[in-house]
Image (cartoon, grey):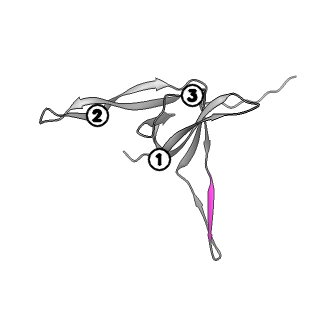
Amino acid sequence: MLLTSYRVVPAVYRLRAVAGVDSYGDTVESWDAPERVRLIGATVQDVRAEETEGTVRRVIRGEKALFVPGAADLTENDRVEIAGEVWRVYGAPTVRHGLASRVYTTATLSRSSG
């Protein structure tokens, strides 16, 4: 009998604000119905950091690392949806070119509140 184990990777979507109009008729950024594009092949890892203050040890949560194959259309103004949770892109995403690996985009995500 062959036993295999695998992990189901949730779909990852890039959310981008669209142009809207405020009550004065001015064009503004709107998150009411953002543009939603699936990031094919994207994976997400939890970031775990520990701080030590004397004898007190604290684990910091609320960050994830995003990896997307290729040069993804992702900016620091975007948000990312993972399994129904919305995360903000923290800082500018980086496109990496490896000598022995393919091109991929990385970004740090922080939890969005609301």
User: Which numbered circle lies on residue 30?
Assistant: 2
Task: Using a 10 Å C-alpha cutoff, classify the residue at mark 2 as few (fewer than 14 neighbours), some (14 to 19) or many (20 or more).
Answer: some
Total tally of numbered discs in the picture: 3
Query: The disc labelled 1 sits on which kind of residue?
Result: Arg
Where 7 sits versus 88, above or below?
above
Ranked by sequence position, the earlier of labels 3 and 2 is 2
Mark 1 crowd level (few <14, some 14–19, many ≥20, 10 Å Cα): some
Amino acid residing under circle 3: Ala
Q: Is residue 32 magenta?
A: no
90 or 36, nearer to the observer: 90
Label 1: which residue? 111
Question: Which residue appears farthest toward the bottom when viewing the image?
Answer: 54
Majority secondary structure in the magenta region: strand
Front residue of 113 and 37? 37
**The C terminus, quarter of image:** top left
Residue at 79% across, 27% down: 4
Residue 39 point in image, percent of width and height: 53, 26
Q: Quadrant of the N terminus?
A: top right
3D distance between C-alphas at marks 1 and 3: 23 Å
| Vertical arrangement, residue 14 with respect to residue 114, above or below | above
Marks 2 and 1, Cα distance to the nearest angstrom? 19 Å
Residue 71 occupies which quadrant of the picture? Answer: top right
Could you say which is closer to the camera, residue 40 or residue 85?
40
- Sequence-earlier tag: 2 or 1: 2
Over which residues does the magenta segment extend? 48-52
Identify the secondary structure beneath mark 1. strand
**Circle 3/circle 2 CB separation < 8 Å:** no
Q: Which residue is mark 3?
A: 71
